[in-house]
Image (cartoon, helix red, strand yellow):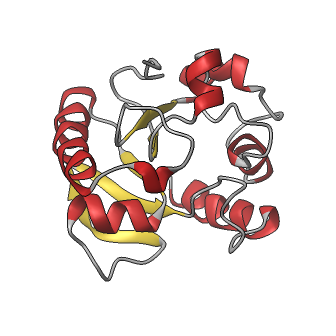
Amino acid sequence: MIVDVIKPGLEVLFCGINPGLVSEATGHHFARPGNRFWPALHLSGFTPSQFAPAEQEKLLELGLGITNVVARPSARADELTIDEMRQGAIELAEKVERYSPKVLAVLGVTVYRAAFGRKKAQVGAQEDTVGGARLWILPNPSGLNAHWQLPALAEEFGRLKASV
């Protein structure tokens, strides 16, 4: 199981869907080479340089962290069951209550809709909160998400950055 990058009082807790197989093998979040999380994080101004997945602990110094909706690794997010996602949403809300980040940024509108039962949710700031934290939905940075290219991802990450 991949370990969360988390501590109390973060500015933003980024929440992936679940670990991929490369992340599980390396112990680092968003470790697959085609994943655009790390480039989008840097291009949006969250990090001073583009961190490598192995540098994930540096995020804590910047008030940032990483967790997942579902802990079970898989090759593709569509291998997860709706029950896993719903249970993951409950556990995520408990984690957010315990660690009190200011913002929870869920990376993937589809998983958010399924896990939290919000079928009409869109990318961006949400009126809902999770565990007391403001909620923001970002596009899934996976290389498999062809709908969002890196410049558009960085722009969405930048909207979140501007709000914190």
Q: In this view, does 121 lie to the left or right of 45?
A: left
Residue 74, compared with residue 81, is above or below; it is: above
Q: Residue at x 34, y 39 (%)?
A: 70
Specify whether residue 52 is in view. Answer: yes
Specify whether residue 57 is in view. Answer: no
Going by the picture, which residue comes out furthest to the bottom?
Answer: 120
Q: Residue at x 60, y 65 (%)?
A: 159
Residue 45, compared with residue 99, is above or below; it is: below
Residue 125, compared with residue 92, is above or below; it is: below
Q: Is residue 32 left or right of residue 112?
A: right
Q: Nearer the viewer, residue 84 or 46?
A: 84
Residue 164: percent from left, percent from top: 50, 52
| Image quadrant in which the N terminus is located | top left
Which corner quadrant of the image does residue 50 belong to? top right
Q: Nearer the viewer, residue 131 or 52?
A: 52
Q: Which residue is drawn at 44% across and 47% down?
A: 17
Q: Which residue is drawn at 49% across and 33% down?
A: 66
Residue 151: percent from left, percent from top: 81, 66
Residue 42: percent from left, percent from top: 77, 43
Residue 24: percent from left, percent from top: 55, 23
Q: In this view, does 23 lie to the left or right of 73?
A: right
